[in-house]
């Protein structure tokens, strides 16, 4: 089964917040075209946050239908702009129930789909992050120690759930980490997030959040056995990125 990842689709919601003001011409039409051509019906796509500009679940329905209409099964991660997501897993499950290709979401838990075990959380800007050259709606959220502590707990809850599910699995699983904020930056400084993720020892860690001139701030490549990949839309030419292919 092929595994793809993509972040920061920033779909317009019923609020009509379109991305042309950021230079994303005709978005999401080119993205849909590339996705439909690249991803197969049985593939898995990790969507690592900032899915929709919706602030309430009802505002996100058309965007979720757009995601559901694309090929492949999907697992969702929350981004900092996904205000529609809410804090209740049970409520989120009801919101997503009309969309059968959305097979799971990361919400203080891990997800198994096919040969993949996926864990993660939204995260936040770590204190070790460099100053990013962007600000505003697609800019840099400043480090907040309370948010970092909360996201550390949420990440650990997901990793703990992954360990339980892996022990109960009857087949070997490929560990994948899926988060929204970068857990590691180009300066290579350890963060509380990178330490936890590298202890989990996934084969890959995919993340989004960074845009435009901030794209170079994220760490990409291999470190301590983990391959880090930045997959926000404008960092990957608006098409899902092939991460793994496991039988």
Image (cartoon, rainbow, N blue to C red):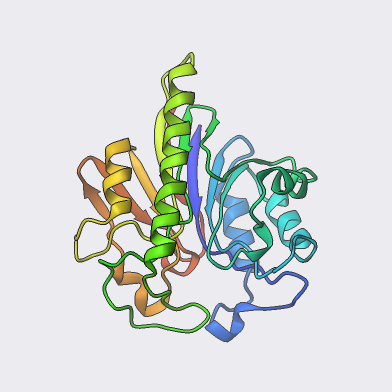
What residue lies at 47% left-to-right and 40% top-to-bottom?
158
Q: Is residue 189 left or right of residue 10?
A: left
Percent coordinates x, y for residue 160 in the rendering: 43, 33
What residue lies at 39% left-to-right and 75% top-to-bottom?
142
Q: Is residue 152 left or right of residue 44?
A: left
Percent coordinates x, y for residue 97 in the rendering: 77, 43
Q: Is residue 136 above or below residue 28?
A: below
Q: Is residue 87 above or below residue 172?
A: below
Percent coordinates x, y for residue 232 in the rendering: 46, 63
Percent coordinates x, y for residue 165 in the rendering: 49, 25
In front of the other: 50 or 39: 50
Numbered circles on residues, count: 0
Residue furthest toward the front?
Answer: 146
Q: Is residue 246 left or right of residue 24?
A: left
Quadrant of residue 129 within the rendered picture:
bottom left
Q: Is residue 80 above or below residue 20?
A: above
Q: Is residue 58 left or right of residue 117?
A: right
What residue lies at 58% left-to-right and 86% top-to-bottom?
21
Quadrant of residue 51 within the rendered picture:
bottom right
In front of the other: 147 or 79: 147
């Amino acid at each position: 089964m092929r595994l793809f990842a993509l972040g920061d689709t920033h779909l317009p919601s019923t609020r009509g917040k379109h991305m042309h003001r950021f230079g994303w011409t005709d978005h999401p039409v080119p993205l849909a075209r590339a996705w439909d051509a690249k991803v197969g019906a049985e593939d898995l796509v990790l969507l690592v946050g900032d899915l929709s500009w919706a602030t309430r679940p009802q505002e996100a329905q058309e965007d979720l239908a757009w995601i559901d209409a694309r090929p492949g099964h999907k697992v969702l991660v929350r981004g900092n702009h996904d205000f529609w997501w809410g804090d209740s897993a049970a409520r989120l499950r009801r919101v997503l129930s009309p969309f059968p290709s959305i097979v799971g979401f990361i919400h203080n838990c891990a997800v198994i789909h096919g040969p993949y075990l996926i864990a993660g959380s939204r995260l936040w800007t770590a204190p070790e992050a460099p100053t990013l050259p962007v600000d505003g709606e697609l800019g840099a959220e400043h480090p907040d120690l309370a948010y970092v502590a909360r996201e550390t707990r949420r990440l650990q809850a997901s990793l703990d759930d992954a360990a339980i599910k892996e022990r109960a699995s009857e087949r070997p699983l490929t560990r994948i980490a899926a988060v929204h904020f970068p857990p590691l930056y180009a300066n290579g400084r350890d963060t509380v997030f990178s330490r936890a993720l590298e202890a989990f020892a996934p084969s890959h860690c995919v993340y989004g959040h960074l845009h435009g001139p901030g794209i170079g701030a994220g760490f990409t490549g291999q470190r301590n056995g983990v391959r880090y990949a930045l997959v926000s839309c404008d960092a990957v030419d608006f098409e899902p990125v092939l991460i793994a292919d496991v039988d």
